[in-house]
Image: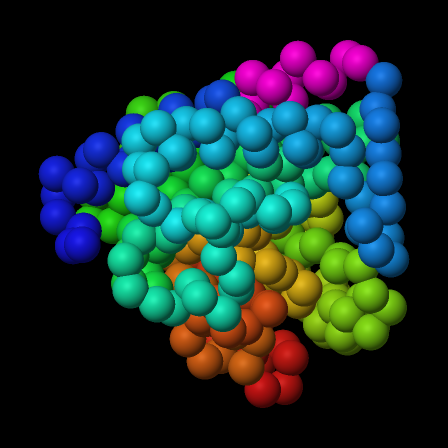
Amino acid sequence: MGSSGAHLEVWLLAAIEAVLAGGAVLRACWPMSRQVHEKGFRDWVTSADLAAQEAILAVIRRHGPEHRILAEEGDHGPAGVDIADLMGEGPVWVVDPLDGTTNFARRFPCFSVSVGLLVDGEPVVGAIYDPLKDMLFTGARGRGAFLNGKPIRVSETERLEQALIGLDWGHQNETRERILGWLGRLAMRCQTVRAIGSAALGMAYVAAGWLDFYFHFALQPWDVAAAAVIIREAGGTIYQPDGAPWSFRSSAAVVSNGRLERAVWAALGM
């Protein structure tokens, strides 16, 4: 199946409907008590994750019952796929029902819903929704990037000392040590640094021009699938930490406004 303009429009509307449905669940759950379970080291899941995911998958199955789905939480039946299948042919929906679970669980008001569509291994449609702030970031390949329907572009910051850099930590100590290595070199050179707690929002903020640069070294495909489209359509770039082109085979991503890479690589001694 190709990704013609007509298909992209239909799929983008489906992605928007899906993130709004998931966001409505999270917004309703926000004032309630939390049921938090530990999936792994520093890795939580809440009842809200699961409820939001069911709402999202119901929308996707209605629009594309034959499409494959990769979602963060649990088994989704015969339509589910493994990460290794992402580079195959045809459409695959990639779903993060609650990106920022720790923030949500601790009532830190920064989290999002992320739904992306890959066709033949390439991200073509993305929607990221912050349900508390009612901010909807969208993008479709060749169609531009938008926030609540208005076009967005990356910043024009070129000097590292004027840059606002975002990051997130990951769960494992080894990942945090690697991040600290970068942070030690960049923090003294940039304007300031922010930790977001939601990778999808951190990347969307680069697309909107609010951050100039963002990096994360422990990502899953559902963290990036929607954001990759929005970043590129907003004029930004996404790399691996060594400067190679980013792909789903990499668990790390460096997102930039497209003007800061040379200064960042120089500061890192690369």
In the depicted structure, whether residue 32 falls above or below residue 139? above
Please check the rendered image and state whether residue 196 is part of the magenta-colored stretch, yes or no. Answer: no
How far from the left and from the top, in percent, is residue 62? Answer: 35, 28
Q: Is residue 89 left or right of residue 159?
A: left
Q: How is the image coloured?
A: rainbow
Q: Viewed as shown, does residue 227 lie left or right of 66?
A: right
Q: Looking at this rendering, what residue extends furthest in the bottom direction?
A: 270
Q: In the visual, does 214 lie left or right of 156?
A: right
Residue 269 spot, x, y in % from top left: 63, 86
Q: Please say whether residue 25 is one of the residues in the magenta stretch.
A: yes
Query: Relative to 107, is 99 on the left or the right?
Result: left
Provide the residue span drawn in magenta. Answer: 22-32
Please name whichever residue, 151 or 189, is drawn nearer the observer in this view of the structure.
151
Q: Residue at x 81, y 31 (%)?
A: 105
Identify the image quadrant of the C terminus: bottom right
Identify the residue at image location x=75%, y=29%.
47
Q: Which of 235/186 is in front?
A: 235
Decide if residue 254 is in sight here. Answer: no
Residue at coordinates 81% horizontally, 44% vertically from top-left? 44
Quarter of the picture holding the N terminus = bottom left
Q: Where on the picture, by quarter, is residue 219?
A: bottom right
